[in-house]
């Protein structure tokens, strides 16, 4: 709009204009818009704390962070094993990213906790090896049994500093997963789902590999565990 914006011009009207702009002009998803609004509110709260403004408009009950449940697919063990069996020996970077994704599928860890994985987290017991750590989000210790698929990855990286694949940025990993998905026949099928766009519910069609992301690994872990398939015979 080319209008000057300072602390005193922040209003509920500006909030609605900003939401509309991000929805219609930038075509952003509700959760992405929500992140921007959350950051804006944190910035304005800090300004209040430092007495840089007396404007409390952002604390209105209407100045909320938009959100919507993201559509996430889960994989079958057959699809996981297809990804594992891909010959990526001539593509070392994609090979490492594939292994990192399998770690998520077999542990259910959030992306933010992957950097915690190292040799010290692996505990050997009579009942089998396990991973012990405290997730950042909860701070409560968890114990994760090491299944054969995860153990094979640990064996593959046993001579590295951590015994696990290198962790790259979430954005780069998500791009790599879509590239991996293209190589799996079942992930080239079309998925029909509903999402929020421009404040409205719309039906979308995408290839399954386009929906792959780090959270797919967590959803896969949770789904297969629920179906008691995580540790197959």
Image: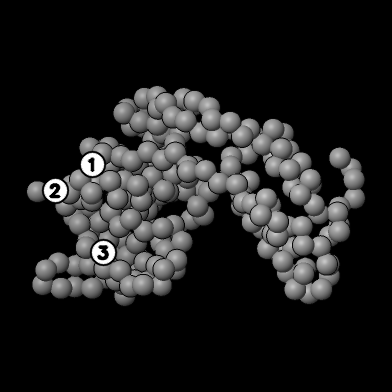
Residue underneath mark 1? 77
- Of labels 1 and 2, earlier in sequence is 1
Q: Which residue reaches farthest front?
A: 61
Mark 3 residue element: strand
Residue 199 occupies quadrant: top right
Q: Disc 3 and disc 2: Cα gap in Å?
A: 16 Å
Residue underneath mark 3? 144
Q: Disc 1 and disc 3: Cα gap in Å?
A: 18 Å
Q: Which residue occupies 20% across, 57% down?
A: 147
Q: Disc 1 and disc 2: Cα gap in Å?
A: 9 Å
Residue 128 occupies quadrant: bottom left
Q: Is residue 209 above or below residue 4?
A: above
Foreground residue among 140 and 60: 60
Q: Which disc, if any, is residue 35?
A: none
Tell me: 229 left or right of 9.
Answer: left
Quadrant location, the N terminus: top right
Foreground residue among 110 and 167: 110
Proximity of marks 1 and 2: CB atoms separated by less than 8 Å: yes
Residue underneath mark 2? 232
Q: Which residue occupies 75% across, 73% down?
A: 49
Q: Is residue 190 above or below residue 63?
A: above
Residue 204: image x %, image y %? Answer: 49, 26
Q: Which residue occupies 71% across, 37% down?
A: 20
Tell me: 22 left or right of 180.
Answer: right
Mark 1 residue element: helix
Foreground residue among 189 and 151: 189
Residue 50: image x %, image y %? Answer: 78, 74
Residue 117 occupies quadrant: bottom left
């Amino acid at each position: 709009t080319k209008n000057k914006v300072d602390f005193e011009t922040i209003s509920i009207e500006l909030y609605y204009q900003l939401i509309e702009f991000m929805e219609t002009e930038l075509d952003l998803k509700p959760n992405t818009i929500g992140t921007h609004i959350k950051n804006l509110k944190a910035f304005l709260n800090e300004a209040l704390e430092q007495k840089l403004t007396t404007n409390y408009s952002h604390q209105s009950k209407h100045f909320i962070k938009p959100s919507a449940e993201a559509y996430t697919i889960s994989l079958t063990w057959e699809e996981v094993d297809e990804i594992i069996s891909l010959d990526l020996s001539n593509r070392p970077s994609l090979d490492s990213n594939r292994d990192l994704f399998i770690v998520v599928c077999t542990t259910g860890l959030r992306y933010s906790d992957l950097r915690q994985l190292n040799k010290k987290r692996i505990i050997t017991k009579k009942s089998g090896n396990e991973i012990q750590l405290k997730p950042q989000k909860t701070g409560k210790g968890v114990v994760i049994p090491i299944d054969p698929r995860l153990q094979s990855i640990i064996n593959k990286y046993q001579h590295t500093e951590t015994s696990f694949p290198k962790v790259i940025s979430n954005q780069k990993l998500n791009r790599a997963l879509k590239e991996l998905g293209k190589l799996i026949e079942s992930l080239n099928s079309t998925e029909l789902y509903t999402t929020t766009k421009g404040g409205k519910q719309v039906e979308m069609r995408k290839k399954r590999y386009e929906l792959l992301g780090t959270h797919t690994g967590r959803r896969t872990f949770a789904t297969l565990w629920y179906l008691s398939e995580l540790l197959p015979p």
